[in-house]
Amino acid sequence: MEITAKMVKELRDKTNAGMMDCKQALAESGGDLDKAIDHLRQKGLLTARKRAGRATLEGVVHSYIHAGSKLGVMVEVNCETDFVARNEAFEDFAHNVAMHIAAASPICVDKDGLPAELLEKERQIYRAQALEMGKPEQVVDKIVDGRIKKFYSEVCLLDQPYVKDPDLTIQDLLNGLIATIGENINIRRFVRFQLGEEV
C-alpha cells in the first residue's frame, strides 16, 4: 500500500511523532492508522525506558490561566538540556499538560504521589461496596483492584486520558515526546488554583 503525505500528516497530528517515524510506522502497519499509533506508542515506551535514568535538570515552569481568570495552573516539566527546554514541541507539551490539568483536576503526578491514607480509604470503600452487593470474598479483591486502577486514571495525571484525545493517556503523550525529542523528560509537579477553592 502506498503511504501518502495525507496519511503521514494525520498520524503526525494524532501523535506528535516525527514525520519519518510516522511514515515508517504506517509502512510497517500496512497503512492501518490504529496499528501505526500502537507501533509509535510502543516505540515511545521503549525510548522512555532507555532514557528514564538520565538526569533532568533543565526545563520550564509553565503557567496557564483559563478564560475568565478564575482557574489557573502552574506545571514544572523537566528535560536534560536547556536547548530542549526552548524547543517548540517541548513548550507545546508543557502548555497542553497545563490545559489538561485545568480541565481534568488531577491530584498528583503519579501513583507515588497519592497520599497512602487516601488510597487506603478508597480501598475500604470499594471493599465495603463489593461486600454489600453480595459478591463472594474471593472475587472482592479483584473488584477492588479494578476500581483502584480506575481511581488512578481519575486522579493521577500520568494515568488520565488526555482531554484532547482520550485514546491517549498523559503518559502516552509524554512517551511520544521523549521518542521525538530523544531526551528524558518528566512532569515534576503542578499546582491548580480555582477561585474560592481551598488549596
Image: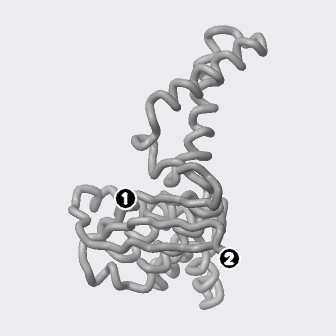
Q: Please, is residue 34 above or below residue 121 in the view?
A: below
| Badge 2 or badge 1: first in the primary sequence | 2
Kind of residue at badge 2: Ala
Task: Say what secondary structure mark 2 lies in.
Answer: loop
- Residue 137 placed where, x, y %? 64, 9
- Residue 55 placed where, x, y %? 21, 62
Q: Residue at x 61, y 61 (%)?
A: 162
Determine the image quadrant of residue 129: top right
Foreground: disc 2 or disc 1: 2
Determine the image quadrant of residue 185: bottom left
Kind of residue at badge 1: Arg
Q: Residue at x 37, y 84 (%)?
A: 87
Q: Residue furthest front?
A: 196
Q: Which of 37/119 is in front?
A: 119
Colour scheme of the rendered structure? one colour
- Residue 197 placed where, x, y %? 62, 53
Tell me if 103 is positioned left or right of 179 in this view.
right
Q: Please, is residue 178 above or below residue 48 in the view?
A: below
Q: Is residue 36 visible?
A: no
- Residue 30 placed where, x, y %? 60, 72
Q: Please, is residue 159 above or below residue 98 in the view?
A: above
Please give the count of numbered marks on the rendered protein.
2
Q: Is residue 152 visible?
A: yes
Q: Label 1 near label 2: C-beta < 8 Å?
A: no
Q: Residue at x 42, y 43 (%)?
A: 113
Tell me if 156 is positioned left or right of 154 in this view.
left
Residue designated by label 2: 67
Report, in whole angstroms, how far the alpha carbon at label 2 lies from the one at label 1.
25 Å
